[in-house]
Image (cartoon, rainbow, N blue to C red):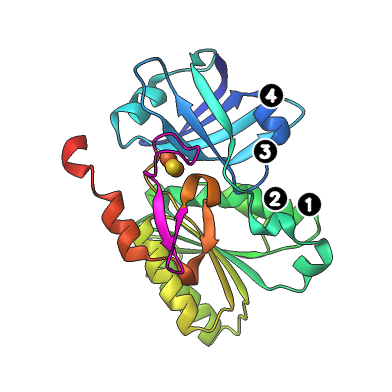
Amino acid sequence: MYKIVKKQMLKENIALMDIEAKRCAKACKIGQFVVVIIDEVGERVPLTICDFDREKGTVTIVFQTIGSSTKRLAKLNEGEYIDTFTGPLGSPSELETMSGEELRTKNIVFIGGGVGIAPIYPQLKFLHEKGIKADVILGVRNKDILIFEDELKSVAGNVYISTDDGSYGFHGNAAQYLEHLVKNEGKNYDHAVVIGPMIMMKFTTLKCKELGIKNVIVSLNSLMVDATGMCGACRVSIGGEVKFTCVDGPEFDAYKVDFDECIRRQGIYKGYEK
Ligand code: FES
């Protein structure tokens, strides 16, 4: 059993929890994820690690209450327990494999959309601890659903915010803001990490390509069942090859991802879920 040591509703439908999971906190690396099962009838919910504290032995998750399992999870309170917290799973971020010297040669920008903003934080924190400041562009529908602004400001170089309705920051989406920064404000990036809804990752990747950004990484949030590479539910096509998001990812070279297939596969249980 895994204790919820902190719970905070960041927004009406977005929750943050610190879970006591000593072994996971000790072993996890940036870019990896966990699978949460509330109880014996709970679904397996894959969630990207949003922070960890190796000393306290806690792992932070942030999730949107969109299905029955995440709604039930959000109803639990501090001091209560969840049945299963499996992880760390998946491959660590490519940034983990680079030396400080190599990282310092790069102009890195992180682009986050919606609840995908939270998993950007540990990556920026990792760079910040190495004395590297990367830029961040956050894209949300409106100001009311923006999360992690202060946390990201504490570890990033510049934090640029865009809202679809213009209620805060740049009026437009994150891809449009990226274009504006590169074309009008002299920004020059050669490495982008994009995390957010699949459709946002697809169009932001296209914009990165148009702007000539050399390396683009996305963290895919494919449907998962076992999360150990056996069921094939998280199958994606990367450069024409079949890969499993849960063991080969979740991060992939964005220029090789077949986003249309990812989007199609994400919707296959929509009717059943309803
Ligand atoms: Fe089953 Fe990845 S979730 S193979």
Residue drawn at x 47%, y 37% as measured from the top left: 227
SS for dot 4 = helix
Sooner in the amino-acid sequence: mark 3 or mark 4 = 4
Q: Name the residue under label 2.
A: 125
Three-letter residue code for mark 4: Lys
Q: Mark 3 points at which residue?
A: 28
Q: Confirm or deny contact between disc 1 and disc 2 (CB under 8 A).
A: yes
SS for dot 2 = helix
Q: In this view, does 209 lie above or below 54?
A: below
Report the front residue among 33 and 258. Answer: 258
Marking on residue 22: 4
Question: Badge 2: few (under 14), some or many (20 or more) residues near its Cα, within 10 Å?
Answer: many
Q: Is residue 251 above or below residue 215?
A: above
Three-letter residue code for mark 2: Lys
SS for dot 1 = helix
Q: Confirm or deny contact between disc 3 and disc 2 (CB under 8 A).
A: no
